[in-house]
């Protein structure tokens, strides 16, 4: 039986799928259904692993250049659920860019790149965040921007955990590319502007970053730790934590600000379609990140960015979504103990359960950030828990993806991930429960903006007053989830 493949990008659906912007005059206006479906569908070729230069098998590079292109996705072959999931995995690992949008062949064949970025590699010496794409004999391209680039984690033992909070040091890698390629000041400013520009945000922090010049901007990229990534439309000033995709199926909102509603598999497919650079074509009021006008966008002339725009077919999106839904957490090595059982009681007594409600360990609601006034109409449309936890409002108030909210994250899988909080500011759970983080002289243990030495990590003051032994019990419990 062939599944019924939903048509995802309809004008009707795209109108109300995303939440309004924190400033609703700048809510995203996506491209039309007609525009979207005119984009060519992606052809999926077989890919090959990228090795650290010291681990590449002898003759591998020459062998790659002897391979013929092989098209590996054919929806007509997909019959069972298992077929869809397997095809989805292949697509999850398929890079959508072969023109060096982030890094290129020279970078990954250079040892310095691995040193400068402290690049994690697997126990086989594979750098799993990029792939070699063979598009024809001798046509070997470095492929960027597969889902796996940002949603894959190399664990301490060198194994690979797909779908987990990623640990690709992407912004450090990008900084290396900008520096080693000698990209000009105007080039660096231009790239940073279309990635993060949000001139309508109060105080225009990204405009100020761009004006601060090449060196400062590159420092801002370098400041983003592994486990977070300045995804387009977000920020390297307020970088979002790379979310854990294991368990996404049960989440009602996508992105830290809950921008995308998640009511069905179609919504996840929309999210995947939108985030493959289609959001660069959005209008936010009259602002478009690529500097397009509506006339230019709808003129029918092709838009190059950095190649010709293409898209996944609906069947491909469906397969990826099925794969993402199939992701399972590995077995947790932290078994319940006397101390963790005590932590469980503290978790309930401290009221953590109100927001991090078992079994999902989230109530799946949106909390307003400091400074955001919830419009009345939102109470009817969205699941809101009307208490601000007081964390840094920058991401949700000052970026293109900002909604004014932070969703309550699930605490499942804390043991295999980090850094924590939406902006990845804290490396360890101990830091979250350390009251010293509230002071201005605190040095954040993971993300810290490039232009400050110290910074308070504000908000989420739950559990801070507990005696040390209770904090340890609480953490022991959290690590069993
Ligand atoms: C360049 C890095 C990068 C790539 C490539 C990437 N993602 Fe993401 N993804 C992120 C980051 C960072 C976020 C968090 C964004 C935010 O909160 O603003 C995210 C968010 C998500 C979310 C929302 C999850 C949640 O709980 O909020 C889903 C689902 C997702 N990505 C799936 C995918 C899939 C599927 C692909 C491949 C088609 C993909 N991503 C490619 C970095 C990436
Ligand atoms: C009022 C709701 C609320 C309560 C109560 C609450 N939290 Fe949270 N929690 C949140 C929100 C919202 C975030 C995300 C904040 C952000 O990233 O800016 C969060 C984040 C977290 C994180 C980081 C998760 C990650 O993926 O980075 C942990 C761990 C956590 N909470 C544990 C707890 C514990 C333990 C308690 C009780 C002592 C607690 N929370 C009480 C709402 C709450």
Image (spheres, rainbow, N blue to C red):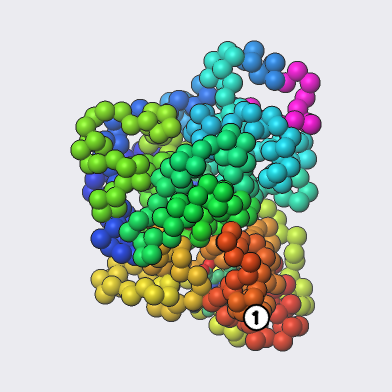
**Is most of the magenta stretch helix, strand or loop?**
loop
**At 21% from the left edge and 32% from the top edge, which residue is drawn?**
299
Secondary structure at numbered mark 1: helix
Q: Residues within 10 Å of mark 1 (few under 14, many from 20)?
A: some
Disc 1 marks which residue? 435
Dividing the image into 4 quarters, which one contains the C terminus?
bottom right
Indicate the quadrant where residue 41 lies: top left
Residue 351: image x %, image y %? 55, 82
Residue 19: image x %, image y %? 33, 60
Indicate the quadrant where residue 257 lies: bottom left
Above or below — where is 46 with respect to 471?
A: above
**At 60% from the left edge and 71% from the top edge, which residue is drawn?**
455
Residue 80: image x %, image y %? 49, 35
Residue 124: image x %, image y %? 77, 36
**At 77% from the left edge and 73% from the top edge, which residue is drawn?**
337
- Is residue 362 at all visible to an observer of this figure? no
Considering depth in this image, is 395 or 209 the residue closer to the camera?
209
Could you tell whether 454 is left or right of 258 in the image? right
Dividing the image into 4 quarters, which one contains the N terminus?
top left
Residue 51 covered by magenta stretch: yes
Above or below — where is 286 with respect to 432?
A: above
The segment highlighted magenta reads 48-60
**At 75% from the left edge and 64% from the top edge, which residue is drawn?**
334
Considering depth in this image, is 353 or 308 the residue closer to the camera?
308
Considering depth in this image, is 10 or 309 the residue closer to the camera?
309
């Amino acid at each position: 039986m062939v599944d019924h493949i939903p048509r995802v990008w309809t004008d009707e659906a795209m109108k109300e799928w995303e939440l309004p912007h924190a400033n609703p005059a700048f809510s995203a206006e996506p491209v039309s259904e007609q525009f979207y479906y005119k984009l060519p569908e992606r052809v999926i070729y077989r890919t090959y692993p990228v090795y650290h230069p010291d681990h590449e098998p002898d003759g591998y590079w020459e062998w790659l250049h002897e391979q013929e292109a092989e098209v590996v996705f054919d929806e007509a072959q997909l019959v069972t659920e298992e077929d869809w999931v397997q095809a989805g995995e292949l697509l999850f690992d398929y890079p959508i860019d072969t023109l060096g949008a982030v890094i290129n062949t020279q970078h990954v064949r250079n040892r310095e790149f691995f040193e400068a970025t402290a690049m994690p590699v697997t126990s086989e010496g594979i750098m799993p965040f990029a792939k070699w794409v063979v598009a024809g004999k001798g046509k070997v391209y470095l492929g960027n921007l597969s889902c796996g680039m940002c949603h894959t984690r190399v664990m301490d033992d060198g194994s690979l955990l797909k779908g987990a909070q990623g640990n690709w040091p992407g912004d450090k890698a990008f900084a290396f590319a900008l520096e080693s390629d000698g990209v000009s000041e105007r080039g660096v400013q231009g790239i940073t502007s279309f990635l993060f520009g949000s001139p309508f945000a109060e105080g225009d922090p990204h405009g100020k970053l761009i004006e601060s010049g090449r060196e400062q901007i590159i420092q801002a990229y370098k400041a983003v730790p592994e486990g977070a990534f300045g995804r387009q439309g977000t920020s390297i000033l307020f970088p979002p934590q790379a979310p854990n995709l294991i368990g996404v199926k049960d989440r009602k909102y996508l992105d830290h600000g809950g921008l995308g509603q998640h009511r069905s598999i179609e919504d996840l497919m929309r999210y995947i379609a939108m985030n493959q650079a289609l959001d660069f074509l959005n209008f936010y009021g009259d602002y478009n990140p690529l500097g397009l006008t509506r006339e230019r966008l709808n003129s029918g002339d092709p838009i190059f960015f950095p190649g010709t725009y293409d898209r996944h077919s609906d069947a491909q999106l469906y397969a990826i979504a099925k794969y993402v839904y199939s992701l399972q957490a590995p077995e947790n090595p932290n078994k319940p103990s006397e101390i963790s059982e005590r932590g469980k009681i503290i978790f309930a007594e401290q009221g953590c359960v109100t927001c991090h409600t078992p079994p999902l360990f989230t109530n799946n609601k949106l909390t307003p950030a400091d400074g955001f006034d919830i419009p009345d109409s939102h109470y009817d449309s969205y699941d809101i828990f009307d208490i601000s936890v007081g964390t840094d409002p920058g991401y949700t108030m000052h970026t293109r993806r900002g909604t004014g909210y932070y969703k309550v994250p699930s605490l499942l899988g804390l043991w295999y991930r980090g850094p924590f909080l939406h902006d990845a500011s804290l490396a360890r759970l101990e830091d979250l429960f350390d009251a010293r983080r509230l002071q201005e002289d605190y040095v954040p243990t993971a993300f810290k903006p490039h232009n400050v030495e110290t910074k308070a990590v504000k908000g989420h003051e739950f559990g801070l007053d507990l005696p040390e032994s209770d904090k340890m019990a609480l953490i022991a419990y959290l690590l069993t989830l």
